[in-house]
Amino acid sequence: MKRLTLLFLFSYITLTNCGSDSKQDLSGLLLLLAGGPGSSFHCGQTVANPVPYTTTTNQSPASISDFINAAGGNNCGSASLVDNDDGTVTDTQNHFLWTLCTAYKPAGTILLYDYVTSNCNAGGVVTADRDITQAQAVTFCENLNFAGHTDWFLPDAIQLDTLYISTSPFSLTPFGTKESLKRLGVVWTSTQTTDKIIHTYTSGTVAQRYVAVADSTGLASLICVAKL
């Protein structure tokens, strides 16, 4: 049975990463076996961090498609989102549950904005909105107990990219007056390249929606995701 499972997983990785090299295929297989990004056959990054791609500090990847391919390739579908009216949004296409509001860090404690009373804080952006390191974002999501879920995690670049549409520019924004990602310029991903951390700007163009940060001292906000 173990041999059959291993053979199936290897075949799956090979098909979803057609055209990538064998090292990337093996990395994706190991991630699946270890329960990392892409496990349980949910879409997302299938190449282990650090992704073999070189970036420049405070710049977008030279090629977004090459960057995504280096992370294992885009194996996600276009998000089909339903507002659950409880501070979460379900993606029925990719079987994800997203926190609707971004986080902020007043007085050293990370919190999610309230979508009920503040529309995810539709007011002006303040320092506390972008005062979270990537390490803090990872820890916050992994420890989050919200909307009946305790299995939250920080999304990788491919998973977060499912929310990108050129007109909003992120598709968590259309739900009534809830501002969510629309009001905030930047949120973290869990994806790291060989020399830089990657986060994504919600206000970026198609060619500029990822930006590399030099080290773990960079600051941004976050949303979390859980698998359904």
Image (cartoon, grey):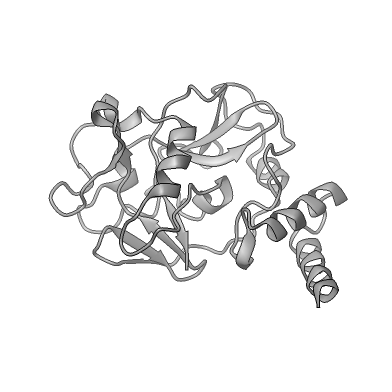
The answer to whether residue 228 is above or below residue 44 is below
Q: Is residue 220 left or right of residue 73?
A: left
The answer to whether residue 20 is above or below residue 204 is below
Q: Is residue 131 left or right of residue 155?
A: left
Q: Is residue 11 left or right of residue 203?
A: right
Residue 42, position as x, y percentages in the image? 59, 64
Q: Viewer-proximal residue, 183 or 41?
A: 41
Identity of the residue drawn at 20% across and 49% down: 114
Identity of the residue drawn at 81% across and 68% down: 6
The answer to whether residue 189 is above or below residue 2 is above
The answer to whether residue 1 is above or below residue 56 is below
Residue 157, position as x, y percentages in the image? 56, 45
Identity of the residue drawn at 62% across and 27% down: 196
Identity of the residue drawn at 18% across and 37% down: 123
The quadrant of the image that shows the N terminus is bottom right
Q: Viewer-proximal residue, 52 or 122?
A: 52
Residue 200, position as x, y percentages in the image? 49, 38
Quadrant of residue 9 within the rendered picture:
bottom right
Q: Viewer-proximal residue, 17 or 137?
A: 137
Q: How many numbered marks are there?
A: 0
Residue 65, position as x, y percentages in the image? 67, 45
Q: Is residue 44 left or right of residue 66?
A: left
Residue that sits furthest to the left in the current view: 117
Quadrant of residue 98 within the rendered picture:
bottom left
